[in-house]
Structure formats: C-alpha cells, structure tokens
Amino acid sequence: MTAPRIGVTLGDPGGVGPEVVLKALAREGVLGEASAVVFGNRRVVSREAAALGFRSRLKSWRREKSGPRGLFLAEIPDTAADVVRGRPDGENGRASFLFFEAAVAAAREGLLDAVVTAPVSKAAWRLAGLPWRGHTEYLEHLYPGAIMTFWSERLRVALLSHHLPLCEAVARIREDILLDFFRALARCTGRISGGPGEFLVAGLNPHAGEGGLLGDEEEREIRPAVEKARAEGIPVSGPYPPDTVFLKALGRPEVMAVALYHDQGLIPFKLGSFETGVNATLGLPFVRTSPDHGTAYEVAGRGAADASSMVEALRLARRFIASSS
C-alpha cells in the first residue's frame, strides 16, 4: 500500500506557522507511515530551523503520485522577500496564500491525500488584495458546501456559518439552509470511522426561545428543519438552549454539537480544547485539517509557540485518511 502523503503549509511567515510546523514534524511518531511535503520557502524554513536549533531534513519534492517516504519541501517561487514579523503584512499574506494554493492544487491532482495548514492572517490576506477571508472561504469557492468543524478529545463542533458578521449569520438560519446542512454533515461524518453518530443542534435565542417568548427562530426555522431531517433518518435533535447544548456533547465522542454561528461554537470549544483542538474542513475530496489557533504574532520569533494543536492536526489528518482508504 502506498504511504499517505500529507501536504503541510507554512502559513504566515511572520507568525508562528513555520515554528509550529517544524516542531510538529520533529515530534516522534507524529507522521507514522506517512510522508510530509512542506509547501513554503527554503529560506524561511532554514531561518526557522536555525533559530530552533534544528537541522533541516527537507529534501526537494518531485511532483509524482508515488515515491520514497520522507520529509520534503515544495519550493514556492517568488516568496523569498524579507519577512515582516509580529504584524499583518501584505507580502506575508501573499506568500501564505501561494503556499496554500499550491498545496490545494497538488491535492486536487491526486498528489496528496491531505493538506494540513498552518495559521494565516485574514488582515494580511486583505492587505495582499485577496478576495477570500481565509482558508475555508477559498475552499468553499472551489467546493460549495464545505463544512467547518472542530475536533478534540473533549468536544466536537460543526458550524452552520463561520466567518460572517453576526447579522449575516443570523439571516442564514433558515429551514431550507439548515436541512441541507444536516444532510451534508451526516453524509460527510458518515465516511469517518468512529465519527459522530448524533447531532445536537443549538438554539439561537436564550433558553432556545422559551417557547417563543424570547424569539421565534427556534419554532419557525430550526425545529422544522430538525424534524424533517429526523424523518429522513438523520440522527439530529434540538434545538437545545445554547448555554447547555455543549455540556450535553462534552466528553461524548459519538456526539457533535451544531452551532449556528462562529462564536457560539468556538467559545466553548476553545475554552476546553485550545491547546489541542483541530479545525477540519469536511465535504472535500481530500482531507484538510489545521490548528485551531491563529498566527500569534505576539510570540512569533521567540521559539515559545506551542505546537500541540499542529501535532493533533497531523494526527487527525492521518486518521481521516485511514477512514477513507
């Protein structure tokens, strides 16, 4: 059997991405039988390796569907400008996008089984003139219906919407959109061995609307979508009060909580799993995972970044690859 191939992007060169990538790849056993291809710039890798006291072991990657196992570098041209650290920068934003774009293109060609992405800056992408807010929006542009989810040992969360202003996110809480989302989520998670088999849907309003006293979205949009999904055999229930639904899912790997907007799901998730949580995009023809933290400009270049979330992102990518083989 061919060893899995995982593409790893360096993320924003001015953040902690290069550091956590090298630290994670140096961790004993993190790749198992897989090979890793780092998409980035050798100058950035060499500088970071020297700062960490590591010896760079990345060989140049040949674009082929099979080959020797190991650690490789896919050199992305025209990204060797001086790196600005500690703040959003347009050139860094452009470089981080080019790393990511190249990895996704390789995955779409069948050269990679998974893409694991180090953090990028939405502000830097904007400074670079890019039309996408981040990784997931770019993937949605290629694969409409891609789903943002978060995984840890303690909690699993799926987001109906993610990087939207709150008023726009609330406008998407409609019966038809919810029903399509439940169908897609069940289809995607059904392909994952040991994945969640039950979905608990959060309400929008305090106390899930208290029977219409505190808002009617639950009765007007959410509950009808849940009932129709259940009639189709999808194991979904709710809406539950948002302040208790995550407790119902906590410590139960067979359960996934469904949040209706970004912060509703990410506040409880990061509160309990910030160091080891993983962001996974479902609904793609390849695996995509990422640490659940950002560029951490404030600690970039100090050698103090925690690589635990990147380690878990690599491990989850391996698990998802095994589930699909």
Image (spheres, rainbow, N blue to C red):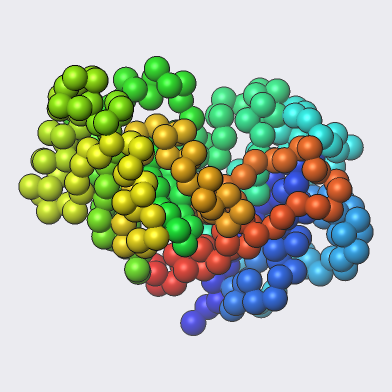
Which is more toward the observer, 180 or 97? 180
In the shown orientation, is residue 176 left or right of residue 263? left
Which is more toward the observer, 228 or 68? 228
Q: Quadrant of residue 210?
A: top left
Which is more toward the observer, 54 or 144? 54
Q: Is residue 61 visible?
A: no
Q: Quadrant of residue 128?
A: top right
**Is 239 drawn above or below residue 173 in the view shown?**
below
Instruction: Give the quarter of the figure containing the C terminus.
Output: bottom left
Q: Position of residue 229 (x, y in %)?
A: 15, 44
In the shown orientation, is residue 65 left or right of residue 39? left
Residue at (17% x, 52% y) in the render: 234
In the shown orientation, is residue 187 left or right of residue 69? left
Q: Position of residue 116 (x, y in %)?
A: 59, 55
**Is 156 drawn above or below residue 180 in the view shown?**
below
**Count of marks, rendered view:** 0
Q: Position of residue 233 (x, y in %)?
A: 12, 53
Which is more toward the observer, 21 or 65? 21
Residue at (55% x, 40% y) in the render: 135
Residue at (48% x, 30% y) in the render: 163
In the shown orientation, is residue 202 left or right of residue 96? left
Q: Is residue 56 visible?
A: yes
Q: Quadrant of residue 226?
A: top left
